């Protein structure tokens, strides 16, 4: 009898190896390769000849299109992130750190949809029914008609969903706990996760029910399991935030039925998550306008403008290598800004420790924050506060030039709405009128920024001396 063939699969990226190795060739992780049955794993087949296919109808790109029907939750921030609600027949993957509030958010959404007359099924694979009920009571959702089950077997879950009326929304918490009889691997492995997700997506497409899958994340912040899962689903949402702060951000990284890079902001309380309709006020609520080293950055998250404070501290050091600490921004980009300030503006920071922080635990990912960071660094080095009513944005190049950024008009409109009367922005911005408005400072390069800040500091110091 022939010896059964085996294969070795990386549990982090899904790469198939012919033999065991300590390090994966695909992702470079150590001790993530395990032995699996090829008949039930990646690349495995049913063991019989495939049946002959049938031709499908071909059509053209032109023709009538219908907007995808959606199930709106009534939670505006959640509907914003999903593009207007959950699309019927779609699969949504929600990831986040343990305890960040994924189950809380989905329980509130399930209760809100149930009160609107939708049939909602919540399947928990990590908690018992009694634990889920306790959370529902704390959130005030116990009176809703959400149907609850505690099960991890894929076949049993599908049989339960097929009974009775078709559900409008199914929540699976979480995909790492699912296991199927068709795969011999342990729950949480690549084979089991892929098999379970495929079965759930197949059910959603066949019945038209919206499917929400909860996924764990790794220490790097990526959703655990094979990356193929993110390609299979229609939308991927990340629920993130700092446990030291009371706010949470739901961020879209993939959406086949709506915009990406959209965010929804929530505030965590003992009664659950509360929507934050104006996140700029939340991030600027405890701002000290007279403190040096603080600049307000006008940023964009998808279609939403967000104003957040960038704080910098520049202090002399006696160490041979100055320290650079960054929270909420890219450390490599900070090194670039420091080099440009020293090479093109004469701002010497080589003998100073530099600490940079984005207030509120918020994380900035767009390069438009370069000008705000540079302004905060110069302000802290000079020990003089920046004008309290001014916002900053613009991308800095290695030559010292300030490049324009997109959606300038939306940034300025949000700043004016919150009471900021002036702005420092790139001079070549195409979305604003020629010459700008009163209070706008248009700069060509980073040296102009330093000169402008120095002039503002002199005026401020003179006014304080006269007082």
Image (tube, rainbow, N blue to C red):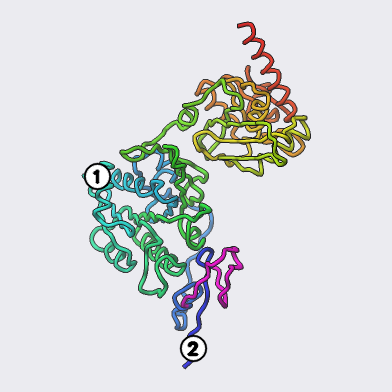
Secondary structure predominantly adopted by residues drawn in magenta: loop
* Residue 29 within the magenta-colored segment of the rendering: yes
Residue 194 image position (x, y, % from top left): 44, 66
> Crowdedness of circle 1 by 10 Å Cα count: few (<14), some, many (20+)?
few
Query: Residue at coordinates 46% horizontally, 32% vertically from top-left?
Result: 279
* Residue 455, x across and y down, in percent: 70, 18
Residue 445 in magenta stretch: no
222 and 119: which one is in front? 222
- Does 57 sit left or right of 126 as displayed? right
State the image coordinates of residue 307 (x, y, percent, origin top left).
Answer: 53, 30
N-terminal of the pair, mark 2 or mark 1, is 2
Q: Secondary structure at mark 2?
A: loop
Q: Which residues are magenta?
A: 15-37
Q: Residue furthest front?
A: 318
Residue 314 point in image, percent of width and height = 65, 31
Left-right relation of 50 to 168: right
Q: Which mark is residue 137?
A: 1
Q: Is residue 273 above or below residue 163?
A: above
């Amino acid at each position: 009898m022939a010896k059964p063939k085996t294969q070795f699969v990386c549990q982090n990226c899904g790469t198939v190896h012919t033999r065991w190795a300590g390090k994966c060739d695909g992702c470079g992780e150590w001790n993530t390769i395990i032995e699996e049955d090829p008949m039930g794993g990646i690349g495995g087949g049913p063991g019989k000849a495939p049946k002959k296919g049938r031709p499908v109808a071909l059509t053209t790109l032109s023709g009538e299109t219908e907007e995808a029907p959606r199930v709106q939750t009534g939670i505006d921030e959640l509907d914003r992130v999903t593009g207007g609600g959950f699309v019927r027949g779609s699969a949504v993957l929600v990831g986040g750190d343990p305890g960040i509030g994924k189950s809380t958010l989905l329980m509130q959404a399930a209760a809100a949809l149930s009160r609107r007359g939708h049939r909602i099924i919540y399947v928990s694979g990590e908690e018992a029914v009694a634990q889920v009920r306790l959370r529902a009571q704390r959130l005030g959702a116990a009176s809703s008609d959400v149907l609850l089950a505690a099960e991890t077997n894929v076949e049993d879950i599908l049989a339960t969903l097929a009974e009775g009326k078709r559900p409008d929304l199914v929540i699976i918490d979480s995909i790492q706990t699912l296991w199927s009889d068709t795969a011999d691997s342990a729950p949480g492995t690549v084979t089991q996760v892929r098999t379970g997700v495929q079965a759930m997506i197949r059910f959603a497409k066949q019945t038209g029910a919206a499917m929400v899958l909860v996924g764990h994340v790794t220490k790097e912040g990526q959703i655990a399991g094979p990356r193929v899962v993110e390609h299979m689903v229609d939308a991927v949402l990340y629920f993130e935030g700092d446990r030291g702060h009371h706010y949470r951000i739901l961020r879209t990284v993939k959406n086949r039925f709506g915009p990406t890079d959209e965010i929804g902001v929530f505030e965590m309380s003992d009664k659950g998550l509360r929507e934050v309709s104006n996140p700029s006020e939340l991030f600027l609520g405890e701002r000290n306008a007279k403190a040096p080293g603080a600049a307000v950055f006008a940023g964009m998250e998808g279609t939403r403008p967000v104003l957040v404070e960038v704080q910098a501290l520049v202090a002399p050091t006696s160490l041979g290598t100055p320290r650079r600490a960054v929270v909420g921004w890219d450390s490599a980009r900070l090194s670039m800004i420091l080099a440009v300030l020293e090479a093109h503006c004469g701002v010497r920071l080589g003998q100073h420790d530099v600490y940079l922080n984005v207030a509120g635990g918020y994380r900035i990912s767009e390069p438009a924050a370069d000008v705000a960071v540079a302004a905060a660094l110069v302000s802290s080095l000079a020990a003089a506060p920046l004008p309290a009513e001014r916002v900053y944005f613009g991308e800095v190049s290695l030559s010292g030039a300030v490049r324009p950024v997109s959606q300038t008009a939306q940034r300025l409109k949000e700043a004016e709405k919150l009471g900021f009367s002036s702005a420092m922005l790139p001079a070549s911005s195409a979305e604003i009128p020629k010459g700008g408005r009163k209070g706008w400072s248009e700069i060509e390069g980073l040296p102009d920024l330093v000169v402008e800040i120095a002039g503002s500091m002199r005026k401020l110091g003179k006014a304080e001396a006269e007082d």
